[in-house]
Amino acid sequence: MAAFRSSIRHYRFFSTTTTKSTSPLTISAVKAKLRSEHDPDKALEIYNSVSDSNASPLANRYAQDLTVKRLAKSRRYADVEKLIDSHKKDPKITQESYFSTLIRSYGLAGMSDHAFRLFNQMDELGTPRSSISFNALLTAYNVSKKFDQVPKLFDEISEKFGISPDKISYGILIKSYCELSLPESVFSILKEMDKKKIEITAITYTTILDSLYKKGKVEEAEKIWEQMIEKGCTPDATAYNVRIMHAHLGKPEDVLALIDEMTKAGLKPDTITYNYLFTCYCKNGMMEDAKKVYQDLQENGCFPNAATFRLNIFYLCKNGEFEKAYEVFKESVKKDKVPAFGTMKILVEGLVKNSKTKEAKSVFKIVRKKFPDNVLNAWKKLGDDLGLSKDEETPTKEAAASA
DNA sequence: TTAGGGTTAG
């Protein structure tokens, strides 16, 4: 119990004005809070408040990942190290899966060398090593974009520690080769897996499929799909979405045919699927069909994500429907998923051009509170250029009410 | 609590 208490104290090493929470934060509450918080110190506060509460491990991990990313973006690598180091005192450190999340976190911060060092400290911290931490180490290199190091480590580490790479290890290895644009290596690895009787999963196939489509190798991608089916590997919604990603560059009929196919296979199209369908309609000048996709989204059991709002606002603006885009923008505010600068610039400029000054000012004010510091100057300059910063000192009743 | 698909462009 004493050890446990000291671990809690360690969790709080950053505590300054930590938010006290009386009830556990839900995952969605944590996500919403952290998503809109770009200040690394405030992200840390939220992170600490999660550790205080009895939030689920998943919420904890999400919070840790986002906090680490925010700190890394501000180049506060010493703070990342401090945060991850503090977890070494946690009794759970002897659980390999827990240890592995810390290794992976270093990768998210772009600190693969630290991930490597941490992996080597497992013995002294009393944590057993298996393919789980091995895979976490390889993942740390992939997420920090050090793809060329993965094949080397795959061989060296598995040999040094006597770890047998599993289906996930091979999936990570294949990901690195895909990113390195070495498809021929991928095919030889697939042969090696066959020989070693290591399962090639839908996830592994999806990695390859995505890579081939993105390189424009459509025929090879289709062959991989056929091979997956022949081998009795069942594609899931993500696998279909990769095909739809390619199909959406063409005609809506092709996207609809794939949605029909996946539905018949018992799979549910998700928000990403519908975002592609929406975009495809827009690109083909079928705005009314596109709008219907957005309207029917919830009916289809899906919720708009950040990309849904961004795509909607962008294409409505492109179509000159700035008032409708403004309505969608207000929804994005409610959901705390306001699009980035580029999209918001198009909206504000369009509103001003169409004499919707009141709406433009409202967008300007709301967005100013949402943007991180590094884009605020550009946003303020745009507001000055468009004359939206005027009357700042004496806001109208309406503006005050909507703020 | 060890792998894959969207996203800051369009």
Image: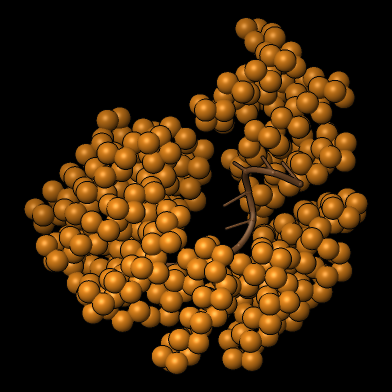
Chain colours: A orange, B brown
Q: Is residue A243 above or below residue A364?
A: below
Quarter holding residue A386: top right
User: Which residue appears at 79% of the width and 56% of the height?
Assistant: A278
Residue A136 in view of the camera: no
User: Residue A57 at what x, y percent from top left?
Assistant: 35, 59
User: Which residue appears at 59% of the width and 91% of the height?
Assistant: A231
Front residue of this view, candidates A328 and A1: A328
Quarter holding residue A95: bottom left
Q: Is residue A227 above or below residue A175?
A: below
In the rendered structure, the answer to whether residue A124 lies left or right of residue A397 reads left
Count of picture labels = 0
Q: Is residue A302 above or below residue A201?
A: above
User: Residue A109 at what x, y percent from top left?
Assistant: 38, 47
For the N terminus of chain A, the quadrant is bottom left
User: Which residue appears at 76% of the width and 72% of the height?
Assistant: A259
User: Residue A52 at what x, y percent from top left?
Assistant: 28, 46
Q: Is residue A374 above or below residue A194?
A: above
Quarter holding residue A242: bottom right
For the C terminus of chain A, the quadrant is top right
User: Residue A161 at what x, y percent from top left?
Assistant: 22, 75
